[in-house]
Image (cartoon, helix red, strand yellow):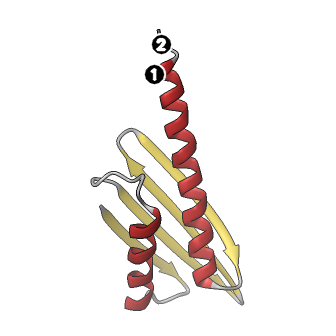
Amino acid sequence: MNLTVTGRNFEITDAIKKFLKKRIAKKGDRLYDNANIHFSFYVDKNRHMAEATVKQKGLTTRAKDETRDLYLTVDNVLGKVEKQLRKHKSRTQNLLTNKT
């Protein structure tokens, strides 16, 4: 899994990278080993915005969120990505089971 983190008007610290890796390891059980994950962080006054792009095996997933707390924003974005991956998995399973 390749993780890229960028920030605008914001410096990415090692603590943030460590937090991201920990959360992805916890919530990213649906991710393939060769998945590319790109996180972008933006700060505007007291709003923290995060955007995630996950590219893996023919599927690109994007999620975006905005709150006052950076860590809550990361959790929300990862939750949205996980929800999209779950939805994609159920769709493909339904297609495979209904092919008979």
56 or 93, nearer to the observer: 93
Q: Quadrant of residue 47?
A: bottom right
Viewer-nearest residue: 11 or 31 = 31
Please say whether residue 27 is visible from this viewpoint.
Answer: yes
Q: Residue at x 40, y 50 (%)?
A: 55
Q: Amino acid at mark 1?
A: Leu
Residue 99 position (above or below residue 55): above
- Looking at the rendered structure, the secondary structure element under dot 1 is helix
Q: Is residue 83 left or right of residue 97?
A: right
Above or below, 31 against 95 in this view is below
Cβ–Cβ below 8 Å for labels 1 and 2?
yes
x 35%, y 68%: residue? 3
Residue 60 in the image: above or below residue 23:
above
Image location (x, y in percent) of residue 98? 52, 16
Residue at the image position 66 percent from the left and 68 percent from the top: 65
Q: Residue 29, percent across and down?
A: 41, 57
Position in image of residue 79 (x %, y %): 59, 62
- Name the element at disc 2: loop
Q: Residues within 10 Å of mark 1 (few under 14, many from 20)?
A: few
Q: Which residue is mark 2?
A: 99
Position in image of residue 25 (x %, y %): 38, 68
Say which residue appears at 47% left-offset and 89% top-offset: 11
| 99 relative to 63, above or below | above
Q: Residues within 10 Å of mark 2 (few under 14, many from 20)?
A: few
- In this view of the protein, can residue 13 be seen by the observer? no
Q: CA distance from mark 1 to mark 2?
A: 5 Å
Left or right? Give the position of 27 relative to 14: right
Query: Quarter of the image holding residue 50?
Result: bottom right
Q: Can you say which quadrant of the picture contains the N terminus? A: bottom left
Q: Residue flagged by tag 2: what amino acid is it?
A: Lys
The residue beneath circle 1 is 96
Q: Is residue 47 left or right of residue 86?
A: right
